[in-house]
């Protein structure tokens, strides 16, 4: 499976973050920018095991509230207390949906990290995160890709119809994950 394309400046930052993995990293950008792909890339390049926590596929999320519960953060706290031979990255998907109680509980993890345990938070709206969390993480903003990179991505998907390409480029607006999703939609 081909890796998602990132803006050259973003790609450089992702490589740098993987080489010198910070204990806590916040990846943010527009919906469709490829935050999850970026986290997977960092984990792969850092030689770390990745565990996506509280993702949309996880049954534990209260889909109506769209919020991560304090109980889920406490479970994460228990999971991260064990020692591991390999680096382990816990990726908090949609971290900006955590309520204040869950964020306060998560602060304890950030303040008392175990060796070999790393956190990557994914957020589209960093203002929804407590200032104390934002101050304890290294922040990396993902930038949209340009039209040339978008075209190359469409080439890799085998889309050569000029009209469909123009529609996809317009709808995706430089967001590679959105472009990939739209390109895979056979109804479009």
Image (cartoon, rainbow, N blue to C red):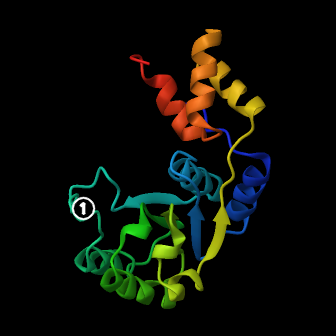
Q: Which quadrant of the rendered structure holds the N terminus?
A: top right
Q: Which residue is mark 1?
A: 61
Q: Is residue 134 visible?
A: yes
In percent of the image, x 61 and y 12: which residue is there?
A: 163
Q: Is 83 situated above or below 8? A: below
Q: Residues within 10 Å of mark 1 (few under 14, many from 20)?
A: some
In percent of the image, x 47 and y 77: which residue is there?
A: 129
Measured from the top left, where is residue 48 in percent x and y? Answer: 55, 60
Measured from the top left, where is residue 82 in percent x and y? Answer: 38, 78
In percent of the image, x 51 and y 83: which residue is there?
A: 133
Measured from the top left, where is residue 2 in percent x and y? Answer: 60, 31
**Which sits in the foreground, 107 or 125?**
125
Q: Is 24 situated above or below 31? A: below
Q: Secondary structure at mark 1?
A: loop
**Which sits in the foreground, 177 or 168?**
168
**Which sits in the foreground, 133 or 169?**
169
Q: Residue furthest top?
A: 161
Q: Which quadrant of the rendered structure holds the C terminus?
A: top left
Q: Is 78 situated above or below 126? A: below
**Which sits in the foreground, 45 or 82?**
45
Measured from the top left, where is residue 110 in percent x and y? Answer: 49, 84
Count up the numbered dots: 1
In percent of the image, x 62 and y 38: which residue is there?
A: 173
The image quarter containing residue 174 is top right
**Horizontal side, residue 89 vs residue 57: left or right:** right
Q: Is residue 160 visible?
A: no
């Amino acid at each position: 499976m081909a890796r998602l394309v990132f803006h050259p400046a973003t790609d450089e930052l992702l490589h740098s973050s993987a080489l010198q993995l910070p204990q806590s990293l916040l990846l943010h950008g527009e919906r469709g920018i490829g935050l999850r792909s970026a986290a997977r890339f960092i984990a792969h390049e850092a030689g770390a095991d990745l565990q996506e926590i509280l993702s949309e596929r996880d049954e534990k999320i209260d889909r109506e509230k769209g919020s991560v519960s304090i109980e889920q953060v406490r479970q994460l706290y228990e999971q991260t207390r064990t020692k591991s031979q390999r680096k382990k990255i816990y990726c908090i998907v949609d971290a900006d949906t955590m309520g204040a109680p869950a964020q306060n509980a998560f602060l304890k993890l950030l303040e008392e990290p175990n060796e070999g345990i790393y956190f990557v938070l994914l957020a589209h709206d960093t203002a929804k995160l407590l200032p104390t969390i934002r101050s304890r993480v290294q922040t990396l903003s993902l930038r949209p890709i340009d039209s040339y990179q978008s075209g190359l991505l469409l080439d890799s998907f085998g889309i050569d119809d000029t009209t469909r390409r123009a529609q996809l480029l317009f709808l995706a607006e430089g967001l590679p994950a959105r472009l990939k999703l739209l390109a895979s939609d056979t109804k479009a």
